Image (cartoon, rainbow, N blue to C red):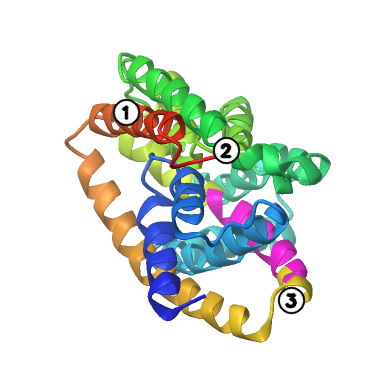
Amino acid sequence: MPLLLAVLLGLVQGLTEFIPISSTAHMTLYGHLSGLLDPMHPEQWTATIAVVQLGTLLAVLAYFARDIGSITGAVVRETIVERKLPHRQSAVARMGWLVALGSLPIGVLGLLLRRVIEGSATKDPLLIATLLAVVAVVMLVAERRRAVRSLESLMVVDALVIGFAQALALLPGASRSGTTISAGLLLGVERSAAARFSFLLSIPALLASGVLELISALRILTQQQLWMLAIATLVAALSGYASIAFLLSYLRSHRLHGFAYYRLVLAGVIIALVWGGWLQ
């Protein structure tokens, strides 16, 4: 993998992971067009994407370091020291339990469907285009919901619903942030609050998939490929931090419509590329 392609790989991952336009769709499209995705060994590309996602994990950990510290400290103190049951704990501590609970669906389904996710079916451009369009419509519908609930108002049912929405992102083109933010809006959660919960919910998923695929990558990738992957991961961390800051600022005064329309246009472009023979 040439250095320039590694840098571009990190930029694509970092700039699209947290914005609701599907990082997997962009990464897979980039893999096809750059020649980095080997159709005979799709599991290598799955491992590559998951490892580069560790860069975006570093970005979200850095951006939400204060929140993560507060939540972790509150959970430990109130559970171990004060011996309070979760439903009697503070809003800060409950947020930690909600994130853990909301992470269960993608964890369980990710393990059960790992072979399917790593296979060639999830690299199909037409599948990606279909999901880009479907989730775009869901986003437009979700924006019609009157969303006024705060982050502190989230309950167990809300966390599970948003968690199952996150599990849909196992399919390329769905977008983790797109499905989770839309689910939050449909539940009446205010837009920026839904985005913050979406980012916090991404931490366990990114960590689990990244570490799991890193183990696989160490076995199937060459030393040079691993060095290029490390560069891509660093670039993803820096660009991912910028994309988080952008999206949270953007959603304070803007709706998801622009991202939804972009997804529809991208879906059309992918279909045109397939029909034109540029993508297989």
Q: Secondary structure at mark 1?
A: helix
Check disc 1: other Cα within 10 Å, few if <14, some if 14-19, many if 20+. many
Q: Is residue 207 magenta?
A: yes
Determine which residue is flagged by label 2: 169
Check disc 3: other Cα within 10 Å, few if <14, some if 14-19, many if 20+. few
At label 1, which amino acid type do we have?
Ala
- Find residue 172 and report its horizontal and vertical position in percent: 56, 39
Magenta part, dominant SS: helix
Range of residues picked out in magenta? 202-216
Question: In the image, 61: left or right of 238?
Answer: right
Compute the Cα span from label 1 to label 3: 37 Å
- Find residue 36 and report its horizontal and vertical position in percent: 54, 62
- Find residue 278 and report its horizontal and vertical position in percent: 43, 42
The dot on residue 260 is 1
Position of residue 221 relative to residue 103, above or below, is below
Foreground: 75 or 190? 190
Residue 158 visible from this viewpoint:
yes
Question: In the image, 94: left or right of 113?
Answer: left
The total number of labels drawn is: 3
Q: Secondary structure at mark 3?
A: helix
The dot on residue 121 is none
Check disc 2: other Cα within 10 Å, few if <14, some if 14-19, many if 20+. many
The dot on residue 218 is 3
Q: Farthest residue in the front direction?
A: 277
Q: Secondary structure at mark 2?
A: helix
The answer to whether the residue labelled 1 contacts the one labelled 3, judged by CB atoms less than 8 Å apart, is no
Foreground: 79 or 41? 41
Q: Earlier in the sequence, mark 1 or mark 2?
A: 2
Q: Residue at x 74, y 76 (%)?
A: 218
Q: Earlier in the sequence, mark 3 or mark 2?
A: 2
